[in-house]
Image: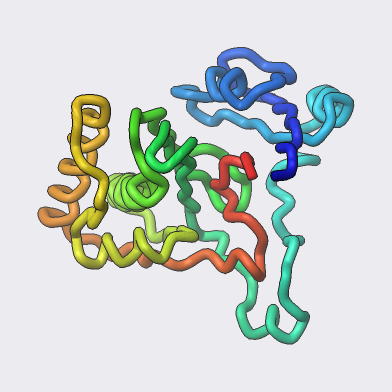
Amino acid sequence: MSKKKKKYYTVWKGHHTGVFESWEDCKAQITNFEGAIYKSFSTFDAAKKALKGNYKDYIGKTSKFKSELSEEQLKKIGKPNYNSISVDAASSGNPGKMEYRGVDTKTKKQLFFQGPFEEGTNNIGEFLAIVHGLAFLKKKKSNRIIYTDSRTAISWIKKKKCNTKLERNTKNKALFELVDRAVDWLKNNTYNTVIVKWETKAWGEIPADFGRK
């Protein structure tokens, strides 16, 4: 296996600002901080330079994507709808510690964040992220759409069921309580929000991606 490349995280807005050498340290600065602004860099010097500059020069420029497709294929798919939010989840192991979040698709501004939860899976996180996004947009009476890169989670939303094979236990009790609340919300609420599959091959990683790949 190839060695995972180290990343450095610049936090422009958070509980504390600066350059952090681990995702855990970065997460501590942005969790429960409304409007947190941060980005990962491959070198310390790049992260430090970004901190001294304007975050707008590094975040929100989503007109260019790293695409695996040809120009002809890209024309057929088109560009993302920026009147949207994007959601994603990350799990350290399967099962493992899981967290999820939602961001503004264009600016990558974090709108909500939950976790970490013990003994979760990525699919459960993706499911919860979509439901959280639906409730978030309904509360704000927003007409924005939701982007997710999980076909599995989309199918679970349609069925109004978290179809996970993960067994409940004492460690993941809090997580499954949240799952039950999410399923209950789906069964007792109506919404007009459109859920759309993010075209990763055309547009690169979804903006809500945790950047740990």
Side of 90 relative to 65 (left or right): left
> Which corner quadrant of the image does residue 56 belong to?
top right
In this picture, is 5 found above or below 202?
A: above
Q: Residue at x 30, y 50 (%)?
A: 131
Give the number of marks. Answer: 0
Q: Residue at x 67, y 16 (%)?
A: 17
Q: Residue at x 80, y 35 (%)?
A: 42
- The answer to whether one can see residue 137 in this image is no
Q: Residue at x 79, y 24 (%)?
A: 51
Side of 136 relative to 75 (left or right): left
Q: Position of residue 112 (x, y in %)?
A: 43, 36
Its colouring scheme is rainbow
Side of 29 relative to 87 (left or right): right
Q: Position of residue 194 (x, y in %)?
A: 37, 67
Q: Position of residue 140 (x, y in %)?
A: 33, 46
| Viewer-proximal residue among 157 and 36 | 157
Q: Position of residue 80 (x, y in %)?
A: 59, 66
| Viewer-proximal residue among 3 and 213 | 3
> Which corner quadrant of the image does residue 160 belong to?
bottom left
Q: Quadrant of the C terminus?
A: top right
> Which corner quadrant of the image does residue 187 belong to?
bottom left
- The answer to whether one can see residue 59 in this image is yes
Most extreme residue toward the front is 1
In this picture, is 29 found above or below 55?
A: above
| Viewer-proximal residue among 158 and 33 | 158
Side of 161 relative to 94 (left or right): left
Q: Quadrant of the N terminus?
A: top right
